[in-house]
Image (cartoon, helix red, strand yellow):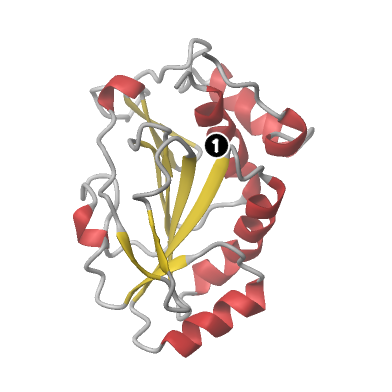
Amino acid sequence: MRRPLRRSVLVPAGAGLAVAAGLLLAGLLTDDGGAEAAPGGRAGGVSTAAGARVLAPGARQHAPALAGDDLDGRQAGLTGLRGHVVVVNVWGSWCGPCRAEAEDLARLSRETPAEEVRFLGINTRDPDRAAARSFVREHGLDFPSLHDPAGELLLRFPPELLNPQAVPSTLVIDRRGRIAVAIGGAVTDEQLRPLLARVVEEES
């Protein structure tokens, strides 16, 4: 059954729609919900769009079943989020590009209904949780972040979709627990919204 998309929340008028329209016109994303190979893209239903690798449903790999303590010592992870679209963001308090994207991610997480999309951070290379918690407070990040100081959680993801050395990185996980979008580097609200909206629209 196709889920209704709340366009007033996920895709506002203006930049978000312009990016989505640009992707369709470029032929990187198709109207039937799939992804086509783009010039310079990869085979197997993977294309590159707006700095993101977008995978067709048949080409997606399952995300690892992450679970652990968040920055406040509470249990968090992907294991209880099956059935939701999930945005996974890899960040560190020491990372300049992470600071640049943090407020966009905080705003998007607040504006997206929790019944449709959940957000999960992975805080990496921060041996001191206090520095990471300070970063969270400074940028208003309301979603939980797993503490992964040695990058061990990152090594569980397919390396072609999540480079452990690329911080920040963002993944969009579909309702079946598969990686639908992989973005290396900082992401903006305008880039992420149309890609996230597309995964939300997919049939379960």
Q: How many marks?
A: 1
Give 113 or 125, whichever is nearer the viewer. Answer: 113
Question: Is residue 27 positioned above or below 102 on the image?
Answer: above
Q: Residue placed at 49% from the left, 21% from the top?
A: 202
Q: Position of residue 160 (x, y in %)?
A: 23, 45
Q: Position of residue 106 (x, y in %)?
A: 64, 60
Q: Position of residue 177 (x, y in %)?
A: 34, 37
Q: Residue placed at 52% from the left, 53% from the top?
A: 119
Rendered image quadrant of residue 20: top right
Rendered image quadrant of residue 14: top right
Question: Is residue 198 positioned above or below 183 on the image?
Answer: above
Give 106 or 42, whichever is nearer the viewer. Answer: 106
Q: Is residue 22 left or right of residue 204?
A: right
| Residues packed near mark 1 inside 10 Å, few (<14), some (14 to 19) or many (20 plus) | many
Q: Quadrant of the C terminus?
A: top left
- Local secondary structure at mark 1: helix
Q: Residue furthest top?
A: 32
Give 102 or 85, whichever is nearer the viewer. Answer: 85
Amino acid marked by disc 1: Leu
Residue under pointer 1: 196
Q: Position of residue 122 (x, y in %)?
A: 40, 65
Rendered image quadrant of residue 3: top right
Q: Is residue 102 left or right of residue 178?
A: right
Question: Is residue 146 positioned above or below 137 on the image?
Answer: above
Q: Residue placed at 53% from the left, 48% from the top?
A: 118
